Every structure is written in structure tokens, then in C-alpha cells.
Image (cartoon, rainbow, N blue to C red):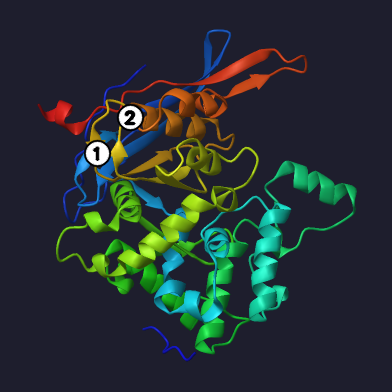
Amino acid sequence: MAVRPPARPQRATAARPAARGRAAKWIVPPVLVRQVRNGLVESVHRGDVVEVDATGRVLRVLGDPDRMVNLRSTVKPFGLMALLRAGGQREFDLVPEELAVMASSHSGEDVHVRTIQAMYRRIGIAQGLLACGTEGMPLDPLTASRLARDGERPGPLRHMCSGQHSVFILLAKLGGWELETYWQAEHPAHVAYQEAVAAAWNVAPNRLRTGIDGCGVLTYAFPLREVARAYAILADPSALPAGDPRAALERHYLTVRDAMLAHPELVAGTRDRLDTSLMKAASGRLVSKSGMEALRGIGILRGPRANGTEVPASGMALKIEDGDGYDRGTWAASVEALRQAGVLEGQALRVLARYHRPQYLDPHGRTGAEAVPAFELAPVGELTG
């Protein structure tokens, strides 16, 4: 098929955006999580959280909703829509499992590798085309240990971004473009991906603020509230205001969302991955996608919250200031924010307990330290009332 090249608990305070034309002032984020050992606070994780609806109306906020963040891997569900817009799902007969892994930051487990390999064999793509590298992969420790034991060096398929890179490769094959240089920003496949991101955020492609991601492709920067809004739209594109051009992409949003909901283990992994655990614990209620440097976007589907009230879809975005190399701050804050928003309760919270208050054990199994979320994500109406 020919494709034309694309042209202490702290109460929430709403931050005021910088005046137009002035440099943005860095606002020190509030403390979200404290690392506590025998009653002593050893360290803290600061960050910002915002929940909005599909119209962009802020529902809950703590910190600065206008904090600029690089999307990193949180872009993947939206970049995948470039392939859907080009007719790739029909042309390549893509199944939901394949779509889910192309929206993923997978752990490099065998289930992820087999899913991509099967797709490549069917379409006639060489694995050697992948240019995402292998550094630090696979993410899954058990898989990494097994490979090391067997003397097997992990290939690019084990990289957490091999699914995303497959989007570029399939776009190039669909368009009849050169495959080997798909990762370059000037390549038509890369341009198509950029245009899909621009469409999802309703901006002109030439207004995108870009950088180079860890896997070699472009990443994009937006205010945190706009990340949350994008995920609100992913959760329910029918909630878009009349006249919003993104409404034309509704079926693509739903295709990506439903693939992620159906196959959460392919979006992250089968062990110790919060995105997967959140989607399984709150089955059918939310889609979650993390990005490097402790960013997470969550789309919350329409449904009852903890008080039993039916609530329209919304999106939540959370960023830990220090990048959270141990994951504990992101884990604890994400679960707590969803609890305070009424999305998680009861059995779902019990299932997620190890993420909600991550514990660190000594060699004898005793709890040495615990990451404790300590903040108040108050509804905006309470802040202004």
C-alpha cells in the first residue's frame, strides 16, 4: 500500500503560570513521599501531580501543573496512532497484542520478544533493523540473570523501546521508504510519528519542543497538565468538546486504549511493573504508562469513584523531581494519588500494597525502611471555595 510522505501532608496549591514572554520561574515542588527508617526521615521525593478532564479543566492539583516535562515513553500510545492513521493495522493485520507491545516500555521478557518476533516474521521484517540499542536491557532481572547464566547476549528486541521502534519500521515499510534510517528525525516515518504526536496534543508540528530520547528517537516536551489531558482523551475521546479536531481520531484512541487494557502485561511486564499492576488491579478502569525520569500518565475511564458517584473520564500526570532512581517515590505517589481521587480502594489497594508503601528488607526479612506517601491532593473546588 503506497503512503504519501507526511509533511507533611501538604495541601494542594495551584501554581500560577509564568507571564507570556517571561522566563518560567522554577517552583520548588512539594514533598510527596518520605523514605523513613525507624522513625527517621532519610530522604524525600518532591513532585507535581495534576488531574484534568478531557476539556483541560483542572480537577485536582498539587504543585505546578505547568511544569514542563519531557514525555519520554509516555508518548508511546499516541505515537502508535501514526501507524493507525496510515492504515497500518489493516495492511499488516495487526492484533491487539502487537498494538499493546508497540505502546509499551516492556521488560524484555520472552513474551514480549515472541510477540514482536511473530509480527516481524509475518510482515517480513529483519530484526537487525532495530536501532534502539541494548544498553541496560532487559529490564526484567530474572530474564537478565537467565541470559547471563546461559551466556546469551541480549539483542535489541529485549530493549524496552523495541515496540516503539517497530512503529517507525512498519511506517517505513508501509510507505516504501528506506528502512535502515527510520530513527533519523528527517526520515518520513519519523515525521509521520511527529505529526501524530502533534495531532494528539493539538499543536502544529513545527511548534513541537523536542529532544533526543535515550533510545535515539525524538522525545517531546509539554506542560504536565497537557500530559494529563492527553491521557484523559485516551481514556474517553468522546468527551472532547465539540469542534476539537482530535475527535476525528476517536477510533484510533479507542483501538490503542483497548489494546492496552486487554494486555497490560505487554505494556510493561509480568513482574514488578506498576503500569501492569495498576491496570490489572483496576481492571478496565484505567490505562497507565510510565516514562523515564519518573513521569507517569494515567487515563481514568468513566465510572464510579470511591463515593459511588459516576464520574466522567479524566487524566492524571505525575512527575517526581529527582527522577526517582529507586522507583519508590513514583510507585507510592501514583497509588496514593489514585486512592485520593477515589479510583483505587478496597481489594485493589490491598493488591497494590507493595507499591503503595514500598518496603526495604534486610537479609533476615526484617523491614528496614519504608517509603511513605504524605500529601493531600485536594479538589480544585476546595482550593478556590
Q: Amino acid at mark 2?
A: Gly
Viewer-side residue, 116 vs 360? 116
**Residue at image location 21% in from the left, 50% down from the top:** 56
Judging depth in this view, the residue of 12 and 144 nearest the camera is 144
Q: Is residue 131 visible?
A: yes
Residue 105 placement (x, y as % from top left): 57, 54
| Amino acid under disc 1 | Val
At numbered mark 2, what does the secondary structure look like: helix, strand or loop?
loop
Which residue extends farthest left?
A: 385
The residue sitting at 46% across, 66% down in the picture is 80
Q: Position of residue 298 (x, y in %)?
A: 40, 45
In the image, which disc is placed on residue 311?
1
Label 1 vs label 2: CA separation? 10 Å
Cβ–Cβ below 8 Å for labels 1 and 2?
A: yes
Residue 63 got which mark?
none
Is residue 114 positioned above or below 311 on the image? below
Instruction: Tell me where residue 362 sits by quadrant.
Output: top right
User: In this image, 234 relative to 351: left or right?
Assistant: left
User: In the figure, 278 relative to 92: above or below?
Assistant: above
Query: Residue 335: horizontal and vertical position, in percent?
Result: 44, 31
> Who comes first in sequence, dot 1 or dot 2?
1
Q: Which mark is residue 342?
A: 2
Q: Is residue 209 above or below residue 300?
A: below
Q: Quadrant of residue 140?
A: top right
- Point 42% across, 63% down: residue: 255
Mark 1, secondary structure of its residue = strand
